[in-house]
Image: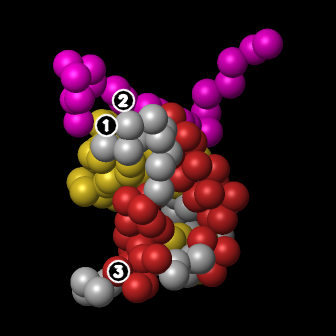
Amino acid sequence: MRYGEKEIKEFNVDNMEIWPNDAKNDYIIKITLPEFMCCCPRSGYPDFATIYLEYIPDQFVVELKAIKLYINTFMHRNVSHEASINEIYNTLKDKLKPKWIKVVGDFNPRGNVHTVIECRSDIVVPK
């Protein structure tokens, strides 16, 4: 088994490590994850992306190794671009309960198609 593979396969998002945010100021945390990979649910081929995470923490911040392990769990899953970014967004929003959050997946082109998926907490579309 490769280094870290066991940690990734056994990672449980319910136990994702978060830390208290002791800062009195509002501030933005920006995390770039340039090696995201998931597998296309239709073809099984790998899809690669850079994930851009930005959030204004309230009471909690995510531990960086925990976010790395969580993101790397997707490499073993068949999941679409849209579903993966929405899942990451929902997981972090539910876990951290930030004041504001944005998750962007900038997927590498495949078959001459470049896809960018963005979820953010300040988008409200009237019905």
Verify whether residue 10 appears in magenta: no
Q: Amino acid type of disc 2?
A: Val
**Which residue has dot 1 on it?**
106
x then y, percent, for residue 29? 41, 59
Give me the residue at 47% from left, 41% from top.
Answer: 41
Give me the residue at 66% from left, 65% from top.
Answer: 95
Instruction: Please report whichever mark, 2 or 3, sits nearer to the chain's N-terminal start.
Output: 3
Tell me, yes or no, whether the two marked residues, 2 and 1, touch with CB atoms within 8 Å.
yes
Tell me, yes or no, whether the two marked residues, 1 and 3, touch with CB atoms within 8 Å.
no
- Label 1 residue SS: strand
x then y, percent, for residue 78? 47, 49
Residue 67, visible in the rendered structure: no
**Which residue has dot 2 on it?**
116
Give me the residue at 55% from left, 40% from top.
Answer: 83
- Most extreme residue toward the top is 127
x then y, percent, for residue 25? 52, 63
**Image quarter (top left, top right, bottom left or bottom right) of the N terminus:** bottom left
Q: Is residue 73 left or right of residue 5?
A: right
- Label 2 residue SS: strand
Which numbered mark, 1 or 3, is in the foreground of this view? 3
Q: CA distance from mark 2 to mark 3?
A: 28 Å
**Image quarter (top left, top right, bottom left or bottom right) of the C terminus:** top right
